[in-house]
């Protein structure tokens, strides 16, 4: 890629109006934004041999090179890169204190989930470590991860709490997310996931922990404006459907929309609870049947699938085809977390959605961009090449076709990532 006159990717030099020329494919060009469901997911508008004008970090104009405008702008020759809207990763647990590769190796040696939990592994181990770690350390570690995922093409991200499981721990996590929001060049949405697991002390006293979530944590979170969404791990052995509804309703009273971990390990009732509560999304969906697919498809709730988590845990993948064919609105996300998806690489998520869930490249790209943005309430800001939206973009290396992206799953095909009209340095 060549920037006429400067030959540099220094972000300072790009703050004026930009005219990007010679784009091999400009992907997901849309006059307006809407949530895509069913067959619409396979429709991915593309302009071949295109130009793009960016002003003040936002998309001002685009079209075919045959209509390239004559304007006063810094010219960037894309040299036949494919340009896509940056990935919108709508489900992550990016703030955590330590990795859990010991547990990973124990699992390889055959230890069961219960044995690992008995050895102090799992979510509770992450919670213990997080409670021992300072806000400053957590922030610094999370910032490194955030930079890493931006460099792999993520242009908006949701981040959950849920490794605190104490009043102090949950607030600490959410304050870290708030500080990340302030520092981040990409939009961040925060979800309060105090209901991620029962701390050992409350194992036999669910009511007391739920009371703490509702009467201690939520009022403080609302007062400090620390969360956008309320999340619950609705699963056998974690939070029941009734408990999920109680917690979400309390969050909704504080203006937080629901976004639920549903049906990861069983038919947990999470999908039905989410639809009833008008959740923005129900996430995971490895275990679905006709009834839950129908329920989701007839709702405005987005079904978010997390294929790298299914892959890492060797679980059956969500039945993406059945959900799409039933007319559901679906998104895909990374679930970046130390226990079930130690990767926030959305390129891999897109590839795995095609390879393992038989989604078409067009469907996976829509699910990771425009529908991912909608699953964070950012549909008007990101997720497509639309006039007025933020110029958060992926510039690929030369590729023969769009299908080459998921096909060549192990290669880094990203040349540059642009955020708010500025190329990111690749450190
Ligand atoms: O989304 N399913 C629940 N929570 C995480 C995993 C958390 C962990 O193991 O640390 C998930 O996969
Ligand atoms: Fe998750």
Image: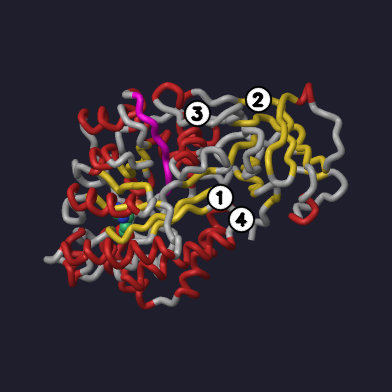
Q: Quadrant of residue 117?
A: bottom left
**In this orientation, does residue 344 appear?**
no
Q: Is the magenta stretch mostly helix, strand or loop?
A: loop
Of labels 3 and 4, earlier in sequence is 4
Query: Real-space Cα distance between discs 1 and 2?
Result: 23 Å
2 lies left or right of 280: right
Disc number for residue 152: 1
Q: Is mark 1 on a helix, strand or loop?
A: loop
Q: Look at the image and tell me in which quarter the C terminus lies.
A: bottom right
Mark 4 highlights which residue? Answer: 185
Task: Give neighbour class at mark 3: few <14, some 14-19, many 20+ (Cα, 10 Å).
Answer: many
Which of the two residues, 362 or 176, is positioned nearer the viewer here?
176
Residue ranking furthest to the left: 204
Q: Where is residue 377 in the image (x, y as percent from the top left)?
A: 47, 43
The segment highlighted magenta reads 327-334
Q: Where is residue 160 in the image (x, y as percent from the top left)?
A: 40, 57
Which of the two residues, 8 or 13, is positioned nearer the viewer here?
13
> With respect to residue 34, does 124 lie above or below?
below
Mark 3 highlights which residue? Answer: 362
């Amino acid at each position: 890629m060549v920037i006429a006159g400067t030959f540099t990717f220094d972000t300072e030099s790009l703050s004026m109006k930009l005219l990007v020329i010679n784009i091999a494919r400009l992907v997901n060009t849309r006059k307006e934004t809407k949530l895509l469901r069913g067959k619409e997911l396979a429709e991915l508008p593309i302009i071949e041999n295109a130009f793009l004008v960016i002003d003040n970090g936002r998309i001002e104009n685009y079209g075919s090179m045959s209509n390239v405008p004559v304007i006063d702008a810094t010219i960037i020759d894309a040299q036949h890169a494919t340009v896509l809207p940056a990935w919108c990763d709508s489900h992550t647990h990016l703030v955590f204190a330590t990795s859990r590769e010991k547990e990973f190796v124990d699992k390889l040696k055959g230890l069961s989930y219960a044995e690992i939990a008995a050895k102090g592994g799992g979510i509770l181990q992450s919670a213990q470590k997080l409670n021992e770690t300072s806000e400053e350390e957590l922030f610094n570690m999370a910032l490194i991860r955030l930079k890493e995922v931006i460099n792999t093409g993520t242009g908006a991200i949701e981040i959950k709490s849920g490794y605190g499981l104490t009043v102090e721990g949950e607030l600490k996590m959410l304050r870290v997310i708030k500080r990340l929001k302030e520092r981040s060049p990409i939009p961040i949405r925060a979800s309060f996931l105090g209901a991620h697991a029962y701390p050992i002390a409350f194992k036999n006293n669910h009511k007391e922990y739920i009371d703490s979530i509702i009467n201690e944590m939520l009022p403080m979170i609302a007062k400090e404006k620390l969360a956008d969404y309320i999340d619950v791990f609705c699963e056998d052995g974690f939070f029941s459907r009734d408990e999920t509804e109680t917690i979400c309703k309390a969050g909704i009273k504080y203006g937080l929309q629901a976004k639920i971990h549903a049906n990861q390990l069983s038919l947990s009732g999470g999908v039905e609870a989410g639809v009833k509560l008008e959740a923005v999304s129900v996430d995971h969906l490895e275990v679905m049947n006709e009834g839950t697919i129908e329920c989701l498809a007839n709702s405005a709730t987005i079904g978010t699938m997390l294929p790298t988590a299914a892959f890492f845990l060797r679980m059956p993948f969500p039945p993406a085809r059945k959900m799409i064919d039933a007319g559901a609105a679906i998104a895909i996300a990374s679930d970046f977390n130390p226990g079930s998806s130690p990767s926030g690489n959305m390129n891999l998520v897109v590839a795995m959605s095609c390879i393992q869930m038989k989604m078409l490249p067009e469907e996976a790209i829509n699910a990771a961009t425009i529908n991912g943005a909608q699953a964070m309430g950012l549909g008007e800001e990101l997720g497509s090449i639309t006039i007025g939206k933020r110029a958060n973009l992926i510039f690929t290396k030369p590729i023969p076709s769009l299908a080459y992206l998921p096909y060549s799953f192990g290669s880094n095909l990203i040349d540059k990532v642009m955020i708010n009209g500025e190329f990111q340095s690749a450190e």
